[in-house]
């Protein structure tokens, strides 16, 4: 993890050019100490104004044939969802729970797509009943189950056929950047053909296109555009070969954000230029001139909007090493451990004195309260030594932060999720006491909690 009060860094860490939650020493435009006092620590803080700017920055580069569906898995907090629904985005859901939640948040099901491997019958049926825009099928078996369910409900369901990224040769370039276990997703070319043929034949399915997800956290505009082009080409060929009209191509998400200090951002301008070229080619092709394109980003829209606010509890020295224990840890921000991605950690206390105060810089480890050596945010970094009571922020936790962690480990309270919009902060989800889930258990037969 990179550190706080870097040489030459401005009060908030010298990252003013980035659109992120920490600016001018303020967290989402508010004093960190005020937020900590009002909501307690640890807490996730989401700046919805950052989300707005990310959506607008992307939208302005997308040709008119593109639709945006927010990948809910990145952050399913209701405040985030309502904000994005209010901005007119669609949603990409990957479970029945996410589907119910986006409907609750105000998304029109006609703008909702359902993706993901291993969708159960109840989830597929819920999608059909809700009238979602399209269901992405990941296997021939799933296609058959969906056809039966749709038939049982007397509804015709539009479907996309998901191509396995590792089997699509043209996606090679994306694959070398990062492969998220793409081996389990979608179908190979043979199954794609079988699925397309069966969907064309089915009275209950309407094949409208192809879906392919390249890779996650890609900041290479060229690679992302190449993936979109390759997916359109695959889809156009399949549509002609199988005899369906190509109405939609879903090129997935994967638009990346910088995590480390100095890491390059995705060049949206270059991305936009390449997509405009693709758009122009599609317009001249009879097979694709009316085809719509869908992008389903998660991380790009919400990642930088989130910070994890934590307070120093204890400090000690082990040999030459100073160890600072904070009240939060990897049970709430698992990504660094899970995917080996360092997140920046910033000191929020003492910023008023500024870098000129030049405090002594010492080797410091910042760790959480869990009984595992993995629970470390900063290892032996040379920095100004935080004191008990100081506030720190782990940045870029707006995507895959709360939702990709393990809050039950060691039975600490689940941190609140605080949303901030235009300077107004509210508890979008309150702190959850461990007794909520520990108390809802049964140690003996016949004493099962209600609803078990
Ligand atoms: C099908 C699908 N769409 C969209 C996303 C969102 O990806 P990202 O947050 O990298 O944009 C994912 C992430 O796993 C995904 O599996």
Image (cartoon, helix red, strand yellow):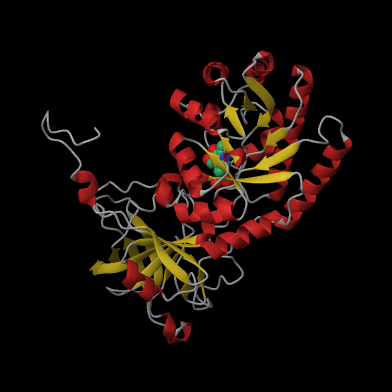
- Residues 87 and 395: in front is 87
- Farthest residue toward the front? 154
Residue 250 in view: yes
Quick check: 92 left or right of 283? left
- Residues 143 and 185: in front is 143
Residue 413 image position (x, y, % from top left) = 26, 55
In which quadrant of this rendering is ligand 1 seen? top right
Residue 162 in view: no
Residue 275 image position (x, y, % from top left) = 77, 47
Q: Is residue 167 above or below residue 386?
A: above
- Farthest residue toward the right? 284
Residue 260 image position (x, y, % from top left) = 53, 60
**Image quarter of the C terminus:** top left
Tally the numbered discs: 0
- Residues 32 and 361: in front is 32
Quick check: 172 left or right of 306? right
**Image quarter of the N terminus:** bottom left
Quick check: 31 left or right of 86? left
x 47%, y 76%: residue: 25
- Snapshot quadrant of residue 439: top left
x 34%, y 74%: residue: 385
Residue 190 image position (x, y, % from top left) = 66, 16
């Amino acid at each position: 993890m990179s550190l706080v009060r870097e040489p030459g860094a401005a009060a908030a860490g010298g990252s003013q050019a980035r659109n992120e939650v920490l600016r001018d020493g303020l967290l989402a435009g508010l004093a960190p100490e005020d937020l900590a006092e009002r909501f307690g620590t640890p807490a996730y803080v989401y700046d919805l104004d950052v989300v707005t700017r990310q959506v607008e920055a992307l939208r302005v580069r997308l040709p008119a044939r593109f639709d945006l569906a927010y990948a809910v898995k990145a952050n399913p907090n209701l405040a985030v969802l309502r904000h994005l629904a209010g901005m007119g985005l669609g949603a990409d859901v990957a479970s029945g729970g996410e589907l119910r939640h986006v409907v609750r948040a105000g998304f029109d099901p006609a703008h909702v797509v359902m993706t993901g491997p291993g969708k159960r019958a109840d989830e597929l049926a819920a999608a059909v009943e809700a009238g979602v825009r399209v269901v992405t099928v990941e296997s021939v078996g799933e296609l058959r189950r969906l056809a039966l369910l749709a038939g049982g409900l007397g509804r015709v369901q539009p479907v996309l056929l998901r191509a396995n990224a590792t089997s699509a040769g043209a996606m090679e370039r994306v694959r070398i950047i990062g492969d998220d276990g793409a081996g389990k997703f979608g179908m190979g070319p043979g199954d794609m053909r079988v699925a397309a043929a069966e969907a064309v034949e089915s009275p209950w399915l309407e094949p409208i296109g192809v879906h392919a997800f390249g890779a996650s956290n890609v900041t290479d505009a060229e690679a992302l555009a190449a993936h979109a082009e390759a997916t359109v080409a695959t889809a156009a060929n399949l549509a002609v070969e199988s005899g369906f009209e190509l109405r939609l191509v879903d090129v997935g998400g994967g638009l990346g954000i910088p995590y480390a200090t100095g890491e390059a951002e995705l060049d949206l301008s270059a991305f936009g230029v390449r997509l405009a070229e693709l758009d122009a080619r599609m317009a001249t092709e009879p097979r694709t001139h009316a085809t719509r394109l869908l992008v389903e980003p998660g991380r790009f829209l919400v990642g930088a909007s989130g910070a994890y606010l934590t307070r120093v509890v204890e400090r000690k020295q082990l040999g030459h090493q100073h160890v600072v224990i904070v009240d939060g840890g990897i049970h709430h921000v698992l990504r660094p451990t899970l995917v080996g991605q360092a997140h920046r950690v910033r000191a929020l206390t003492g910023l008023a004195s500024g870098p000129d105060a030049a405090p002594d810089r010492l080797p410091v480890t910042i760790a959480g309260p869990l009984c595992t050596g993995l629970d470390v945010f900063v290892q032996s970094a040379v920095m100004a030594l935080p004191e008990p009571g100081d506030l720190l922020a782990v940045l870029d936790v707006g995507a895959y932060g709360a939702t990709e962690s393990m809050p039950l480990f060691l039975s600490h309270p689940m941190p609140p999720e605080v949303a901030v919009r235009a300077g107004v902060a509210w508890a979008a989800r309150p702190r959850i006491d461990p007794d909520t889930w520990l108390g809802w258990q049964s140690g003996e037969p016949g004493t099962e909690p209600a609803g078990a």
